Amino acid sequence: MIRIAPSLLAADFGSLAEQVGEIAGEADLLHLDVMDGHFVPNLTIGPPVVASLRKHTGMFFDCHLMVEEPLEFLDPFFQAGANSCSVHVEVPSVKEAIAETKKLGMEVGLALNPDTPFEKAVPYMDSINMILIMTVFPGFGGQSFMAEVLPKIRQARDFITNNSLNVFVEVDGGIDHNTAPQSALFGADTFVAGTSIFKKDRPWEAARVLKNSIQQALGETNGNEKFSSDPTTRES
Ligand code: DX5
Ligand code: ZN
């Protein structure tokens, strides 16, 4: 299953509800980037904005918490209408934050910065619904995809397969019609895209093009082999 998650960070903040309406029909999740000015050097949206958007759409809200103290914000985001919250493995309270997210009844995501090895996520893999693999350093939209992260996507996918886990693999940062298919071939199934959707004249069409590019790439591979062999070395 392929899921497209437009990132609101690249939308026009002056007309958020309208922008969400534009992509709702082509998106599977709405990715909401929450930044606290500490974990990352930027400030974005908080629970009041999520609560306001909730009145306009029934979309699945995929909240990406780039915050140093997630425990302080999980309940407010849940109350605001979040469906899932992803916390970063790099924050000291990650274990408690995962437990609290689950306790509140939200889906649990675990995010890894580009330079954080997959091994850091291993102790939590059977407690989460999604692993969020950052393909840029978090903080800002519009950055270039880091291809050196691709092997980590494969590592996560292999771990999930080998342990029969039910965990989505989300990629976030510099995702477009070139990098999404690449990520898919390494095992990603959920694709966050800000710039390549909301900065286009027709965001809904861009979301559709993105999904098609992934489906086409996967369709060209050989069924079960798609996640287990290296597409860069496979013979055609
Ligand atoms: C970066 C955020 C991303 C960002 C992606 O810190 O986590 O979700 O919105 O934006 P693009 O798609 O522009 O790289
Ligand atoms: Zn994000």
Image: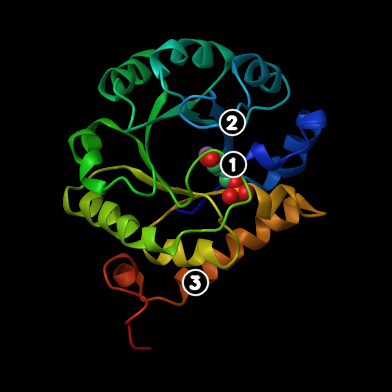
**Real-space Cα separation, disc 2 to disc 3, in angstroms:** 35 Å
Q: Secondary structure at mark 1?
A: loop
Determine if the C-beta at disc 1 is less than 8 A from ligand 1.
yes
Which one is earlier in the sequence, the residue at label 2 or at label 1? 2
Q: Could you tell me residue 189's position as x and y percent?
A: 43, 53
**Real-space Cα separation, disc 2 to disc 1, in angstroms:** 7 Å
Mark 3 nearby-residue class (10 Å; few <14, some 14–19, many ≥20) = some
* Cβ–Cβ under 8 Å for marks 1 and 3: no
Q: Quadrant of ligand 1?
A: top right
**Real-space Cα separation, disc 1 to disc 3, in angstroms:** 28 Å
What residue does disc 2 label?
A: 42
Q: What's the residue at 29%, 42% (across, down)?
A: 166
**Front: mark 2 or 3:** 2
Which one is earlier in the sequence, the residue at label 2 or at label 3? 2
What residue does disc 1 label?
A: 140
Q: Amino acid at mark 2?
A: Asn
In this orientation, does residue 109 appear? yes
Q: Secondary structure at mark 3?
A: helix
Q: What's the residue at 39%, 14% (across, down)?
A: 71
Q: What's the residue at 56%, 55% (across, down)?
A: 174
Q: Could you tell me residue 32's position as x and y percent?
A: 58, 32
Left or right: 173 in relation to 24: left
